[in-house]
Image (spheres, grey):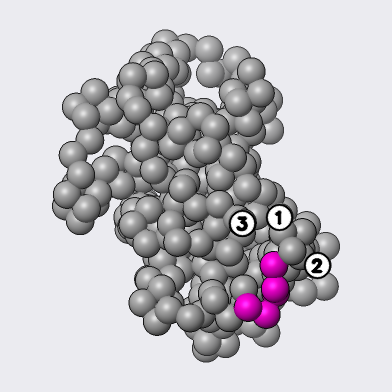
Amino acid sequence: MSSLFTLLLWAWLMASSFIVSGHMVEYASPIATSAFRFLLAMFIMLPALLFSWQRAKLNKTEQFKALFASRRRLCHYVVISGALVGFFIGLFVALQSTTPLNTSVLYTLVPLMGVMITRIWLKEMAPLWRVVGFVLGSIGAMTVLFSTQGFSTQDFPIQGNDGFQWHSGDYIFLGSCFLLALHVVSVQKWGRSLGALSGAFMIMLFGTLWLLPIALIWGELDQVQWLSEGFWVNVLYLTVFTTLFTFVLQQRLVMTVGASRLLAISYTIPVWVALFTALTQSRLLSLVDWPFASGIVLLGIALFLIGGNVSKVKLAYGSNATEK
């Protein structure tokens, strides 16, 4: 039961990131927000990494030098972080012209994209039932979106009551999802040499190095509402809960229940977004219809096919890597 609760908590936090990210647009540009988020996450993670070394009675200086000893590893993390940076920037940019619900559904294509990238790049063939599960999960997520197509909010009025509309931001986020899938596969291939905290620190460090010059040139830093309470509430939530906390949960879940179940539970993200949207609009009863229910059924079948019948697989950040 505790594993199921942890899985649902991870999915809920990931879903909340789409909602909160949508609100960040009014306080800062996507690039400025992403740069500050990575920088803040890196500074929070550094003392945690140092404490883990001290607790393990390791020499901090030697351990820190070891992180940068291999040029090949540094090049790998440049690619790993670059793909992740591209995803976050794409998410914020996309939310300027689409809805959180759209992005949450497109996000569920990431596992299927990961399967395709793994097949082409790593030459690994996924079992047929797992591929079928990924496809059904995406269809189920899309069905959830169609069943809630009438939702619109003051923040995102572009999705009206006249049917599902594909917006320009959806093209942007589709490309962002590909970058996230590439990030996941590249960490699976290259990230096993470091432990969870060390690997996360390297990702945040190189992500910051990617973003800082971009933010200085195109981040519109003079327009960031630094003194706004809303800015700090949203950016701290995104940094602590949907970046650092979800990372820790992900490592625990990969170790305990397997990566396949973590992939499967990601298909529930649009359901949580839909429920949150309906709740804020006092329209929960509008979800009680056959399209929404059929989407839930498809998601249930997908969860069974991906998580119930397949062996555990490796996911991002290298499930074999642990801190010494």
Q: Position of residue 276 (x, y in %)?
A: 63, 32
Cα separation, mark 2 vs mark 3, equals: 41 Å
Callout 3 environment at 10 Å: few (<14), some (14 to 19), or many (20+)?
Answer: few
Q: Where is residue 207 in the image (x, y as percent from the top left)?
A: 52, 72
Query: Would you place residue 296 above or below residue 318 in this image?
Result: above
Dot 2 falls on a residue whose secondary structure is loop
Labels 1 and 3 touching (C-beta < 8 A) = no
- Disc 1 designates what residue? 240
Q: Position of residue 84 (x, y in %)?
A: 45, 63
Q: Where is residue 208 in the image (x, y as percent from the top left)?
A: 56, 76
Amino acid type, label 2 = Ser
Query: Can I make out residue 98 in this image?
Result: no
- For the N terminus, which image quadrant? top right
Please report the residue visible at 45 percent of the width from the left and 51 percent of the height from the top.
Answer: 318
Query: Would you place residue 280 above or below residue 153 in this image?
Result: above
Dot 3 falls on a residue whose secondary structure is loop
Amino acid type, label 1 = Val
- For the C terminus, which image quadrant? bottom right
Please report the residue visible at 41 percent of the width from the left and 45 percent of the height from the top.
Answer: 315
Q: Which of 26 and 268 is in front in this view?
A: 268
Horizontal relation, residue 135 to residue 259: left or right = left
Please report the residue visible at 74 percent of the width from the left and 64 percent of the height from the top.
Answer: 57
Q: Which of marks 2 and 3 is nearer the N terminus?
A: 2
Q: Give the range drawn in magenta.
A: 58-62
Mark 1 vs mark 3: give the one in front. 3
Cα separation, mark 1 vs mark 3, equals: 24 Å
Horizontal relation, residue 23 to residue 73: left or right = right
Mark 2 vs mark 3: give the one in front. 3
Callout 1 environment at 10 Å: few (<14), some (14 to 19), or many (20+)?
Answer: some
**Residue 76 numbered mark, or none:** none
